[in-house]
Amino acid sequence: MIVWNPWHGCHKISEGCQHCYMFRRDEAFGKDSNRVTQTKDFHLPIMRTRSREYRLTYLDNPIYVCLTSDFFIEEADPWRQAVWDIIHYRKDLQFKIITKRIHRFNECLPEKSVRSYPNVTIVCTCENQRTADERLPILLSVNAVHKEIIHEPMLERIDIEPYLSSGEIEAVTCGGESGDDARICDYDWILDTREQCVRHNVAFHFRQTGAKFRKGKRLFYIERSLQMRQAQKADIDFVPVTEEERNPYDRILRFLSKSPYMTAFTLPPDMKEYCRKRDMKDIERQAYELIRQKLAPACPKNDGYQTPKDGHPVFIAQHAVAACSRKRLEKWHDIAMGRKLTEREIIYIVGLVMEWIRRELAKDDTAPTENNLSS
Ligand code: SF4
């Protein structure tokens, strides 16, 4: 994890700051954490090595900004524009700005539009429900390109569904508190946040357990060096499902729609009626039967002529998706002729056929009618 601290020092602002790591570390060195000063790393992203290469490269992404302070702290107001400029200059680097002071975002904007900083993610920290309800509406309202949430240290179960449902939040990270006085982090809270993320298809990352970790009725004391590893072991991170994974047939149907021959096929009203009167599972069963019989053998009889152009919705769909013969399967789907279809290939073809039928049926639901046309 690469950290860039252009300034150091902060003031405690909410419950999550109570055992701030930076304060604890400074105290050990007799340093005043409330004094905010520039650091020697102020220009880190544009500093070069002796061989004139940048010290930070895209391989270091993402760069975490201000972990021993807050990017939006008042004392840094005179220095912040220089940092915005550095961030703008190093477009190849991804910067994650972590803050508990999202309320100052609009006072601390760069001279250029904040939309011209696609390499910046604003990460709002909220440790409990109170801070979530105070800060997240502000996070949603600001004009940043990328937005994330961190619950670290997570101090209680936190409901963030109203904010996730906005579609603006890209990721949520959870973690416990470190140090001798650490407050307990409960695994159920972590799982609850994960569930919220899964429901809204938002990335979720369990970063570390913290020093006192409760799982069920047991309380575990976990050494700092093991806190990240234990979280990793839980293996509960969630990666959002892409549009293509949601509907794996989207891309291929878009590709096939370039063929005038295939787009000429539509499901006539009697066939739609046939589908609507039946359970779609029955149609799917019929599709499996027809594909297994007429397409699956290594050398189907009369290949190229085995699928009529009407008489059953599956026949019409097969023509519309280039799955009516082995020749067309090879040409459009790269499925070789001269060998038996595999089970995976049969599942793929039936899925495609059924998706086409579903889309044809849905067209009626969205087509304008006399009743739903506005005047
Ligand atoms: S905002 Fe962050 S750096 Fe500042 S006191 Fe709180 S936890 Fe520490």
Image: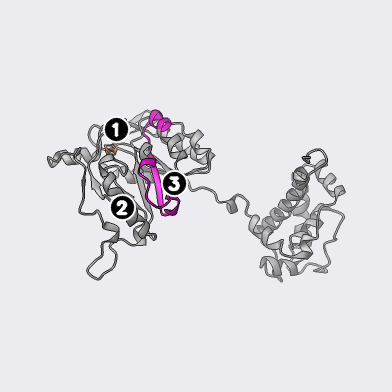
Q: Nearer the viewer, residue 240 or 99?
A: 99
x then y, percent, for residue 178: 27, 38
Task: Specify how the rendered protein is coloured.
Answer: one colour
Q: Which residue is mark 2?
A: 83
Residue type at mark 3 is Ala
Residue at left 26%, top 56%?
43
x then y, percent, for residue 12: 26, 33
Q: Quadrant of residue 237?
A: top left
Q: Which residue is mark 3?
A: 144
Q: Mark 1 and mark 3: span between their CA atoms?
A: 23 Å
Q: Alpha-carbon neighbours of circle 1 within 10 Å: few (<14), some, or many (≥20)?
A: few
Q: Secondary structure at mark 2?
A: helix
Label at residue 233: none
Specify whether tag 1 is near ligand 1 (CB below 8 Å): yes
Q: Is residue 113 above or below residue 258?
A: above
Q: Nearer the viewer, residue 350 or 369?
A: 369
Which tag is nearer the camera, tag 1 or tag 3? 3
Q: Which residues are magenta?
A: 106-134
Q: Secondary structure at mark 1?
A: loop
Q: Which residue is mark 1?
A: 13
